[in-house]
Image: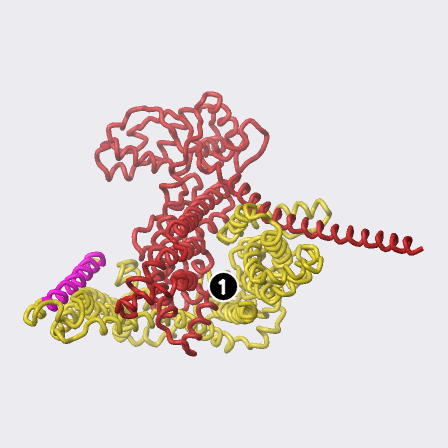
Chain colours: A yellow, B red
Amino acid sequence: MTTYTFFAVFLLLAFASYHFGRLRSVQLSKEVGGVRKLAALPNYYGMLSVLWAVIPSLIFLALWTMFDETFFNRAAMSALPESVAQLSPDKLTLLMNKISIAAKEGVGVSTLQEELLPAFNEYQSLYQQYGAIKPFLVLLLLVVGALFSLRFISVKYNARTSVERITNILLLVSSCIAVITTVGIVFSVLFESFRFFQKIPLTEFIFGTHWNPQIAIRADQVAADGSFGAIPLFTGTLLISAIALIIAVPVGLMSAIYLSEYASKSVRNWIKPILEILAGVPTVVYGFFAALTVAPFIKDAGSLLGLEVASASALAAGLVMGIMIIPFVSSLSDDVINAVPQSLRDGSYGLGATQSETIRKVIIPAALPGIVGGVLLAASRAIGETMIVVMAAGLAANLTANPLEAVTTVTVQIKTLLVGDQEFDSAKTLAAFALGLVLFLVTLCLNFIALHVVKKYREQYD
Amino acid sequence: MTTDVDKHNLEKRRAHIKKRYKAERRFRSFGIAAVSFGLLCVVILFTDIIGKGMGAFRQTYVQMEMTFDANTLGITDANDQAQVKGANFGGLVKKNLRDAYPQYKTRKDKKALYGIVSSEIGLILRDDLLANPEKLGTTETIWLLADDDIDMHYKYALGTDKQVGRISELQKNIVDELHAAGKVEKRFNRLFFTNAASREPELAGIKGALMGSFLTLIVTLILSFPIGIATAIYLEEFAPKNKITDFIEVNINNLAAVPSIIFGLLGLAIFINFFGVPRSVPLVGGLVLALMTLPTIIISSRAAIKAVPPSIREAAYGMGASKMQTVTHHVLPLAMPGMLTGTIIGMAQALGETAPLLMIGMVAFIVDVPSSITDSATVLPVQIFLWADSPERAFIERTSAAIMVLLAFLIVMNSFAVWLRKKLERRW
């Protein structure tokens, strides 16, 4: 049964269960004097049937899909000969992957060794058998659920409250997905980082000044021992983010002030959306712009002035990142500046202050917490930004504060370590998760402080 | 005496006021400078991209006499599909080129000559002959796709001494000759929209990436729209005000600001390594992007629900509606425009997102156009990233063109969101 026919039949049966649930309630009501005597409207009986039919079968489908691979793998592994089963876990996983791909897609069956064939056959027969009965079992469960609901529908039974209770639970479950996501993030980075720190001590990672994650993938390979001192990455990230903030904060703040305090309404209505375009441009576009336009430009300008500029200078990446977060700073500042009550402005004007004096001495101090919050959010944005630095910043870890040299960042290293060949046991791959953990914690702190500051400030004037 | 002092004070005050006004003007000009800088950035960014990318929408073709010679092809019957598929079309193209330019005899010259047309031109001719078997043995004048270096030269350096791309003097001369004879022209680059990725710039297109983006966004939409709206409804209408609800809220606000690359790590560790979802397919990309866009949808949906005045709810309660009926019959329809706006903006974000998709392997070089959510695929931003890395000059042009397509989609989506808000949103 193909996926599409399965879903078509599934939908058809779900629709049928609605129809029959409704029909059943209408029929029952005939004996007692019409639909009016029902405890709920007939539609609700239909919906109840649908819920009873669909929810258990979907849960069943999800669980089955999640665990069938593990089951097949177990069964196939027991069919492996002794010599293979005693291999190291990594190699075994690799072999099992090969077998499962061969069994599912028929790719590379001929390359499998002789001793793997029983396991392959076992896997394939299980995969085909269970794959064939799975859709029928799901549909059967759907029908059973629908029939069960038809049995307990009665005139006195209030289907509406049941439907509403179930819906309420579904709503609650959806709102927990955000929490589950956070938990998932924390666990995924924490677990792998933990494995990383078993190989590389935490102190070396945090205080080491030498980053060179090239280590031997194969045992016989000649390669330097990797070193995992993340200080150059942190300084590189800070350097680029600092350049970005130096550009974005004054420009963003001043444009917000100009647009909300000086500009006429029509000017504001035109210019604001144009500036907002900068926020909607995908980061990969900025990366392209930085790597192919800004970086060569800065290099040429530098050589005109007799300066040595790296072709992937921190300045280019920082500058473009700054452009990217201008609208971010300006819209956040705009919000807080507009939240300052008009009475403060009027009071200041009444004392004879000019507009700029009012802004500098009254509005900015009043809006300062909000502005600081906005800057912190912008900083967290800059630190977590990936594509611009991947495309325009360097790869070599370089401990420097010179913006004209190439530096690398945390996000660049995560991307570099994880894209391409991976082996989930090497310190090289796990290092990416450790860096991810650092990144997550730092941005989390910044966001938390920023949101707290902004919220606290808002409460003052509301 | 006193008048002198007054005068002195007055002058001092005037000078002071002058200074203050000067500061006022200075401050104001800073504001104008900041706004102008922002606007300038927009202008530079767009002119740069458009200037680099416009050329990619036109592609150079060269006119040639092409004899479908059965001997060179090594086939006897053009109706036999298997024969035609295995035929030597590369040799056919070379032979025709040699016949057209018999003066080039050395190996090096011949190689340069063959470099005039796309190296994959044989495949195009093969498809042509498969469709029209009667052409075997005939000679016709056809337009052939030019190689990317010829294309670059013809577009940007024709008649000048500029060296664009890897083009030899001999090839330059041939192009000049062809140009003088009117046998080379630029046409609309249809292949850019109908081909998937390719190593040859002149054959590379965005169809595969567009389909990948489309499938990925479908998965994202199917997951994030219902879940986002359900969460917003629950938090606004049903959730009791307690610690748990606060915790969920804090979580959502934080998720909105988590760097996107972290979501890629999540997808890699949880979806791919733990649940065994295949790598580099739209399914896993859509899952990751759905989690990423959820906060955006939730936050805007909550704002939309909040904007529905309580009087509507009270009227519904007054008519005897239950809480759930009030929400589904009244609040939800009224808040729907706002929710849709938020969803479209979230989808636009997801469409432009690159970093998390790199983590889950959607960077593979994929020549086939994906047709389902479990086919290996790449998406438009990732395609841009991959092309931006390619050394060929022609790829820079194509990257910019792909960026233009991406930006066009984003502008359409965002304008649609704005239009929807203006059109459907009611002010109470």
The magenta span reads A3-26
Q: Residue furthest top?
A: B181
Residue closer to the observer: A141 or A218? A141
On the image, which quarter does residue A176 sit in?
A: bottom left
In this picture, is A19 found above or below B177? below
Q: Secondary structure at mark 1?
A: loop
User: Please, what is the three-letter code of the amino acid marked with disc 1?
Assistant: Pro
Residue A245 appears in view? yes
In the image: residue B33, left or right of residue A33: right
Residue appearing at x 57%, y 34% in the figure: B163
Mark 1, Cα crowd under 10 Å, few <14 / some 14-19 / many 20+, is many
Residue closer to the observer: A421 or A441? A441
In this picture, is B90 found above or below B98? below
Residue closer to the observer: A361 or B224? A361
Is residue A7 part of the magenta span, yes or no? yes
How far across and down, in percent of the image, does residue A415 sit?
Answer: 49, 61
How far across and down, in percent of the image, does residue A404 sit?
Answer: 66, 55
Residue A138 appears in view? no
Magenta residues: mostly which secondary structure? helix
How far across and down, in percent of the image, does residue A348 sit?
Answer: 67, 60
Residue appearing at x 53%, y 56% in the figure: A390
How far across and down, in percent of the image, does residue A132 sit?
Answer: 18, 64
The residue where tag 1 is placed is B259
